[in-house]
Image (cartoon, grey):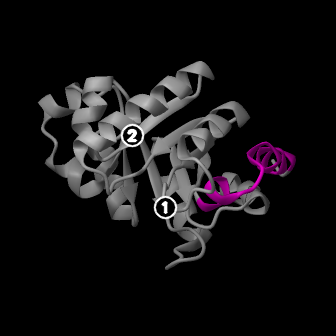
Amino acid sequence: MMICVTNRKLCRGDFLERIRQLAAGGADVILLREKDLSPAAYTELAEKCLAICREYSTALWLNSFTGTAAALQLPVQLPLSVLQELTDADKEKLPAFGASVHSLADAQLAEKLCADWLIAGHIFPTSPRGMDFLREICSHVSVPVYAIGGITPQRQAEVRQAGASGCCVMSQMMQCPDVSAEFQNWRRMI
């Protein structure tokens, strides 16, 4: 599974057009990261992205904004610290939620807190934890784990061999000149 993570500041061209290209091109999930926005601005953007994603039957996950996720009934990716603060009543309002993890202890805690999936990183470039880290996480939890950080088409097989259910990609999908060609490149390497 490929999760395309958004970043307006890295986006080449119009952001909503890039969302359309990602949804049309084959993203399994678009994770609307944009955590620098106010709750109102994030909700407005999420509604626009959701309309585009629905056209292409592409899943949209939100990031951090639990109120928006509950209102729109969309899955949400959370920092572990935010997940730890959610009450059972808060969790019941969300259709699904995942957690960002950076250690085995984080992963085990997130699973105990009922996370539906984990995003583990950074696997490669910035402060890389590497493939041993990813293998350790995948072998110690029962929920799906997605790798983030420096994942390239050439590295996705290695990520899957480590036990990950897929990967998250931001920079390449936000900056590539041709989204369709980029997806073809990724599919060729699977």
Residue 83 visible: yes
Say what amino acid the circle numbered 2 marks.
Leu
Rendered location of residue 5, percent (x, y): 53, 50
Q: Which residue is mark 1?
A: 9
Quarter of the image for residue 29 reads: top right
Mark 1: secondary structure: loop
Q: Which residue corresponds to the image point at 49% horizontal and 55% vertical from the top-left?
A: 7
Question: Dot 2: what SS?
Answer: strand
Residue shown at 71%/61% (left/top)? 152
Residue 157: x and y in percent read: 75, 55
In this rendering, position of residue 72 left or right of residue 141: left
Query: Which residue is disc 2 drawn over?
Result: 62
Q: For this rendering, which residue is in front, 125 or 140?
A: 125
Which image quarter: residue 158? bottom right
* 38 shown above or below 45: below
Q: Which residues are magenta?
A: 171-188
